Structure formats: C-alpha cells, structure tokens
Image: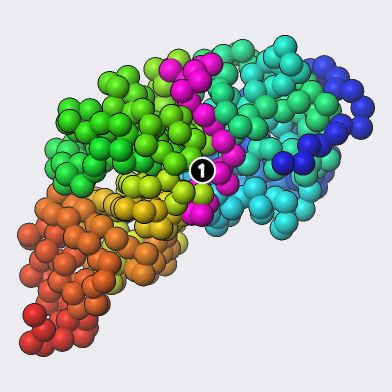
Amino acid sequence: MTRRVAAAPARRISADEAAALVQPGMWLDYGAVLGQPDAFDAALGKRIGDLSGVKVRSCLSVRPRAVVEADPEGKHVHWVSLHFSGYDRKKHDSGLSHYMPVNLGEIPDYYRRFIDPVDIVVIKTCPMDENGYFNMSAANLWHGAVIERARCVIVEECATMPYVMGVETGVHVSEVDYIIPGDNRPQPELPSAPASEVDRAVARLITQEIDDGSCLQIGIGGMPNAVCSLIGESGIKDLGIHTEMLVDGIIDLYRAGKVTGARKQIDTGKIVATFALGSAYLYEAIDRNPDFEFHPVDHTNLPHRIMLNDNVVAINNTTQIDLQGQAASESDGHRQISGTGGQLQFIRGSYASKGGKSFICLSSTFDKRGDRRSRIVPRLTPGNTVTAPRSDMMYVVTEYGIVNLKGKSLPERALALISIAHPDFREELEREAYAAGMIPRGFF
C-alpha cells in the first residue's frame, strides 16, 4: 500500500464547510457499507440543488442518501453503486442509481489502474486513536486504495463505530485533509433473515459435506444463516473463517466454540473478513477483539489468496440457474437487484483450494405475483446476468437434493439439475430439455 501524504496538516471543519468544497462536475467517493458518511451527506444534500454534474460512487448503502433524496429527478447528482442494497435497488428502479459491474476483490486494482483520481473521498471512521489513526471499522474493503488516489480526503469521525483489528485498517492523520464530526447515531443494522424450512432443508444437505477444520465463506441470506445454525447444532469443530462479509451467523459459531482457525494455512487462528454488516450483537463482538482481522478486499476475495487455505467451503445463493449450470444471482432480466460481489471469486478460489468445495444454493421455486415458478429453468430469463459460468459450477443445492456438476456433460447436467427441481416442474423441464436437444433421445 502506498501512503498518501496530505499537502497540509489536517484541519477540523464542520460538515457544512466540507460540503462547500464540492464543485460542479466533481467525482466524489462515499466508500462502502458502514463507511459511508452521514453528516457530510446530509450537508451536501442541503446544497445539491445548487450544483450540477456531481458524480458519487458508493457501495451497499445502509441508510437513505440525502443527496439522492434531495434530487428526486436526478438532475444534479449521478449515483453509481458497486453493489446494490435494498435502498440502492429501489433508487435504480426509479432511474436514480446505476450499477458498475465488478468482481469485488478486484476493486482496489480498478482504483489504482483504471479509475481516474477521485476529487473528494469521504469515509466515516472511528475517532482518531492515540497513534494518529482513524480506524475504518467494519468496512476495510478498497478504502485504502481510494484514499491513495484522491485529491482530497475527508474523514467523518463517529464514536459509535466498532474499532476493529487487522491489516491496513486505519487512515493516518498525515493522509487526511479535513476532519469533520459525525452524528454518532447507532450503526445501521441488518439482522440475519430468519431461516425457513426450505432454508433448513438446503442447509442440512450442505452441512453433511462440511468436515472438521474446513475454512468457511458464508454469504448473506437465510440459507447461509441456516447453515451456520445447523453447524452450531452439529459435532463439526475447528472451523476456520475466511470470508468477504461477516454476518451474525458466524458470530454464533464463534460464541459456540466451533471456530478456532487452528487448521488454516494463512491468518491462522484468526477470523478474517473485509467488512461486516449485521446486528448490534455482531458489532459488539468485533469491537477491539483480536480474534477478528479485517483486511482489504483483495486479500479476502482474490482466488489466489483464497486457495492458500485448505478445505475452503464457499456457500452462496443464486436466484436462477439454467440446465447448463449457469447461475444468475444478481439481476431479474435487465433489472439489477444486487451485484456480482465476491460470488464468482469464492467459487473459483474454493475450487482451487486443496479439498475445497463450492455450494450454490437456491429454493426450487418462488412466487411472482401469485404465480409459482421454478428457479431451475431451461434457459435464463432474457437479459439476466450470468454471475457464475457453467464451467465454474460445482455443487448445486435445493431442498430436493444436491448435485455436483464438475465432470458432467451437458446432458448429464440437465438431468442432474432436473432431479433437484421441484417435483411439479420436473416433467415440464425434461420435456423442454429434450425438445431443445439438451438431452438427446435415448440418452441415459
């Protein structure tokens, strides 16, 4: 990491004074998740109507953004997101938020090689510590790379953020141009979704494939959370954690004594993540806790780093998979609903890991305006983004079974996926597969 050196000693100013630095046509960076600024955003929202052509890059907004709310027709600000939250998705549906396709682990390199220097970056941090560092809390990600490339760096101090341990978790005061006070509200929470019976059925199948000493990556959602719950109830022990996002379910495993990290080959004994988003229970657990390490996202997500641990188990969701094994996990046709995130990189990194396994899980059906539909389909919805190519797919799991697509021909894949579809749709899927030539007549 190359440390930036500010042109002059950092000055303490108000949020309104910081917002006054923004000029028409500037590129701003709000960082990601808990690191997105609140006081600065509110101040800029008050004057956004006087500006034009302001562009803001962000990721996973966890609160409404004042600059967007103050510009409901999108005349003054262009909002770009590297991964949609529910809020970002709603704004996208209104034409106010726009997605940038990324593999999350590559983003530091994008800033260093391909993205023009940012005019102003504003990151919410813990208050400056005794060594002159502003801890970036549970949002390490690519913030260090943005700061390296920014013309102006502003930190917004917030006393309610958890102080985390790890690598490159702090911004030194010598890198900072301005310091502004935050509003010190409690941090936004995203408690894990309750697991349904379908989630638990999928989790039971996955848990049977997890061995003592496995190193887990857990995605967001009810199914991965259900896996954590069932591991907690099982005899599985000595688990490691090397993940992108730290969720409540991992804290449950840690509290239950299931996670030691003793068998990890890198970051041994540490629970490793690049960001956290969950409940206050999670934030309390990681605060100044040396068992947890937060690293930049290129450490957690790049496949050649993931594979350095043995027996990596990656567990992620998808929303649709076709009979070739292509997983569409981030869009509904041309409507972006989330993002690629780290899914593809963890699929590849876990496969490259000695003894590693990748699981893509999904419920067999979903309801759309009262119409029950299969998530396993002959062909993807037109416009749907392929998040994971067919060549990368390993285990696919529904509540009706688990199949491994590695080493299977296209006809074998189609038959395997039909076998774990909802029984009500299997005959129709098989008929369409034969009609399309995906399964040759007489093939067994």
Up/down of 162 relative to 210, above or below = above
Q: Is residue 297 magenta?
A: yes
Quarter where residue 52 is shown = top right
Vertical comparison of 339 with 440: above or below:
above
The quadrant the C terminus occupies is bottom left
Residue type at mark 1 is Thr
Q: Quadrant of residue 418?
A: bottom left
The residue indicated by pointer 1 is 300
> x and y percent of residue 195 in the render?
22, 34
Tell me the quarter of the picture where residue 127 sits: top right
Q: Residue at x 36, y 28 (%)?
A: 260
User: Is 293 above or below relative to 398?
Assistant: above
Q: Nearer the viewer, residue 95 or 330?
A: 330
- Work out whether 35 lies above or below 101: above
Give how far across and how far down residue 74 sits, in percent.
Answer: 64, 46
- Give the extent of the magenta segment: 285-304
Q: Is 389 on the left or on the right of 223, as rendered?
A: right
**Residue at (77, 53) in percent of width and height:** 116
